[in-house]
Amino acid sequence: MKKTAIALLAGLGLLISNAANAHLVAFGWKDQGNGTVVFYGQHWHGNQSSAYSDNGGVRIGVWDSNLSAAAQATNTWQLFQWTGFINDMGGTAAQNDALVTNGILDGWAPDTGNFGNTSSDNDWFYTIPFVIGNGTWGLFTGTNCCVDTMTVPGEFTLTGISSVPDGTGPGTAPPSTASAPGTFALLGLGLAGLLARRKFTK
């Protein structure tokens, strides 16, 4: 009886350990309409009060179809940080599909083998806007426990992005996107000054 109890506890511990190998269960994305996209990571670590990573962020790059998942050169992929969080959004496949239907996300994809299709897995981190287009990409955080753990890199197909050409990126936001409002404001001030000067000289 004692041996059976120990065996059951060991088995339970193994199940918990295996389940804890992947706290990041899906990715989502939203086109900002200005040539950049915000990326989302769905996890089951519970509600958060700040964004953080146990793996230094999320790496995104070109998937090499000639290599296995474990052999992907993830150290060469571009690194992006989780900069914000959203609690209690989506969860199951149907609930995540509703996020797309309602325009909150443009698309989402499960981390195959780790997605539990559970409504309580409804907390997300997200990145700053960056440049990435539709296509098949490799994504990986890392194996460090706990909040954004992945067991191996994953291959994901992005769709629904319209403001970035297909296959573009990943990369940081183009300077023109960030500076556009300031440029227009300076142009407006310059024109106003020019008109005032002409009026004064008359």
Image (tube, grey):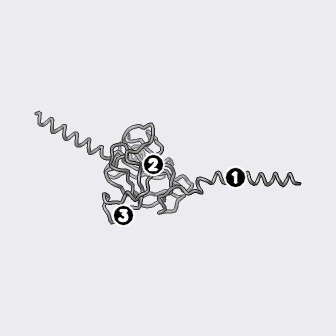
- Residue 72: image x %, image y %? 34, 60
Classify residue 9 by image quadrant: top left
- Residue 49: image x %, image y %? 45, 36
Task: Determine the CA span between mark 1 and mark 3.
Answer: 45 Å
- At x 87%, y 54%, the residue is 201
The image shows residue 120, relative to residue 188, as above or below, that is above
- Residue 124: image x %, image y %? 43, 44
Q: Residue furthest top?
A: 2
Q: What amino acid type is highlighted by mark number 1? A: Leu
The image shows residue 15, relative to residue 29, as above or below, that is above
Does 85 sit left or right of 9 as displayed?
right
CB under 8 Å between discs 1 and 3:
no
Q: Which mark is residue 156?
A: none
Residue to which mark 1 is pinned: 186
Q: Which mark is residue 64?
A: 3
Does 5 sit left or right of 98 as displayed?
left
Query: Helix, strand or loop at disc 1?
Result: helix
Residue to which mark 2 is pinned: 81
* Mark 2 / mark 1, whichever is N-terminal: 2
Query: Helix, strand or loop at disc 3?
Result: loop
**Residue depth check, mark 1 versus mark 3: number of the one nearer the observer:** 1
Of 183 and 159, which appears nearest the observer? 183
Q: Residues within 10 Å of mark 2 (few under 14, many from 20)?
A: some
Of 156 and 170, which appears nearest the observer? 170
